[in-house]
Image (tube, rainbow, N blue to C red):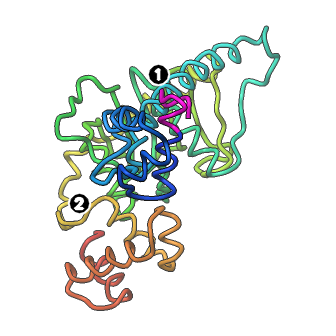
Amino acid sequence: MTSTGLDAAATQLYGYLVDHGPTSMKDLHAQFGSDVSDTLGTLREAGYVIGEPPAARAPQRAFGPLLQEARGRLEALEYHVEALQDRWTANAANTGAPLVERITTREELRKVYNKLDRRTQIEWMQVFTAPFVHLPPFTAPPEDYDPSVLPVRRFIYERAILSSAGGLASVRNAADWGAQIRIADEVSNKLIISDRKVALTPEVPRATLPMLRTTAPALLSGLVAQFEADWAAAAPLDVETSQLAAMPDELSNEDLVALQLVIAGEKLDNIARSMRCSRSTVQRRVTRMCELAGVKTKPQLVHYATKHWLR
């Protein structure tokens, strides 16, 4: 435990309390000697020991701030190394590598997507095609967030996406974060461009996988031009708000994703795995949506939602 900043005596005492639970000062003096009071004071001040008789604070709580700080330093280092790696890879003199990287699994795609999302500083451009595929988790912006300090986000959604619960959840989430949103009757392909330096697009038009990642300037120039053409042809979201009005305000973005999967016929266990939550959480969402719809069963919910909510 040297990385915690505690000396050997404090480390030994904390470990003893972890193993033995609350322990009287009489027993601690017998075990560690007269200096245990000073060591105990050090542990109390650091937040590792609480209560009377002294007890070890739960390690996850005691070391939580330290872990968070370490994760922050690791993420900053990863960001720096990844940025340097991109610059190194982009220079053919270093690698002789192909101009395009092929991404073949959903998990790999999620990691690449999350890295791009963290590293984008100026502008994020994305085109969504039907059928809508939910990739990142939906997160609501904090109450005190300032959209002006975030990268500009421009999203194009195909009109057909508005007929799916997951697609509507994505639109709502993007709007909550202050994204500029346009609706297109049809676009040629999925596309993500980060700071006009990195792009992701399917190997097969409109497919989800495999995806191709490129930093090649010539390819990026063509993809940016494609996005700008689709953007110019698409309509601003405000002309489509009437199609979103039927959705109950009580439904969260995660509710809508669960609803989409229910409509698709997925079992609750599969939905829980897809959404990375427990089966009981999914069941609570479904039960709540049934109450909002005034129905009692999943088939009834599917019928009601497709008729009244997803118009």
Identify the residue position indicated by label 1 in the image: 195
Which of these two is toward me, 248 or 118?
118
Q: From the viewer's perspective, tell me whether residue 183 is left or right of residue 245.
A: right
Q: Quadrant of residue 259?
A: bottom left
Q: Is residue 200 above or below residue 220?
A: below
Q: From the viewer's perspective, tell me whether residue 287 is left or right of residue 239.
A: right
Q: Residue at x 23, y 60 (%)?
A: 243
Region in magenta: 1-11
What secondary structure prevails in the magenta region? helix
Q: Is residue 34 above or below residue 275?
A: above
Residue 30 in picture, x, y percent from top left: 46, 48
Q: Is residue 234 above or below residue 8?
A: below
Residue 25 in picture, x, y percent from top left: 35, 49
| Element marked by disc 1 | loop
Residue 280 in picture, x, y percent from top left: 40, 77
Residue type pointed to by label 2: Gln
Q: Is 10 inside the magenta-drawn segment? A: yes
Residues marked 2 and 1 touching at CB (< 8 Å)? no
Where the N terminus falls, by quadrant? top right
Q: Residue furthest top?
A: 93
Which of these two is toward me, 241 or 2?
2
Q: From the viewer's perspective, tell me whether residue 292 is left or right of residue 280.
A: left
Residue 286 in picture, x, y percent from top left: 33, 78
Residue type pointed to by label 1: Asp
Identify the residue position indicated by label 2 in the image: 243
| Element marked by disc 2 | helix
Q: Residue at x 36, y 37 (%)?
A: 37
Q: Is 156 inside the magenta-drawn segment? A: no
Where the C terminus falls, by quadrant? bottom left
Q: In whole angstroms, how far apart are the C-alphas of marks 2 and 1?
A: 32 Å
